Image (cartoon, helix red, strand yellow):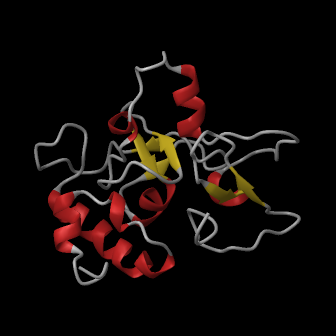
Amino acid sequence: MVGGCCVCADENGWTDNPLIYCDGENCEVAVHQGCYGIQEVPEGEWFCAKCSSAAAKVPGGANEATFCCQLCPFDYGALKKTDRGGWAHVICALYIPEVRFGNVHSMEPVILSDVPCDNGRDGHIGDERVQKVERLLRMRSSLCDWSEFAAPEVRKNLGGAIGE
């Protein structure tokens, strides 16, 4: 995992807050226990919420669009279920003031009921909020090369930040 924890980007882990890596197939999620709300560090394999949910779905039924964050246009990273039945990144939830966690210890579900939805995309936040998340990603862009996964409109908006 490039950049360490998907939430705080710290590459170090500690005895009381270890860095835990998802064992899901082709998953690159790494998170600190405290950053992702992991109650107990597993002895064996650990799967992030996305991989746990994908494993429970019928083969061929889950796709990347199924796991797109409702707060930004990305479908990879440390996601948690939302109260709307979708997904949101922990980092997006932490940076958007109207978003909160139903349980602050497990950090789920991500409560989106106070977030304005004004741009017509089903279940997604308005363009103004997407722009704020894009600015956050601009600040974090030096930590890893996420640009290949960016939606075309985000790549256009972030062109200078991602070297285009």
Q: In this orientation, which residue lies closer to the viewer: 118 or 152?
A: 152
Instruction: Determine the residue positioned at 34% across, 62% down.
Output: 148
User: Is residue 32 found left or right of 78 in the rendered image?
Assistant: right
Q: In this orientation, which residue lies closer to the viewer: 152 or 37?
A: 152
Instruction: Determine the residue positioned at 50% across, 77% down.
Output: 143
User: Is residue 73 found left or right of 102 in the rendered image?
Assistant: left
The extreme top residue here reads 58
Q: Where is residue 17 in the image (x, y as percent from the top left)?
A: 79, 63
Q: In this orientation, which residue lies closer to the viewer: 148 or 89?
A: 148
Instruction: Determine the residue positioned at 57% across, 47% down.
Output: 27
Q: Where is residue 41 in the image (x, y as percent from the top left)?
A: 82, 47
Q: Position of residue 1 (x, y in %)?
A: 62, 63
- Image: 78 above or below 63: below
Which quadrant is home to the C terminus? Answer: bottom left
User: Is residue 139 found left or right of 116 in the rendered image?
Assistant: right
Q: In which quarter of the image is residue 53?
A: top right
Q: Position of residue 131 (x, y in %)?
A: 22, 68
Number of numbered tags placed on the structure image? 0
- Image: 163 above or below 117: below
Instruction: Determine the residue positioned at 40% across, 20% down.
Output: 61
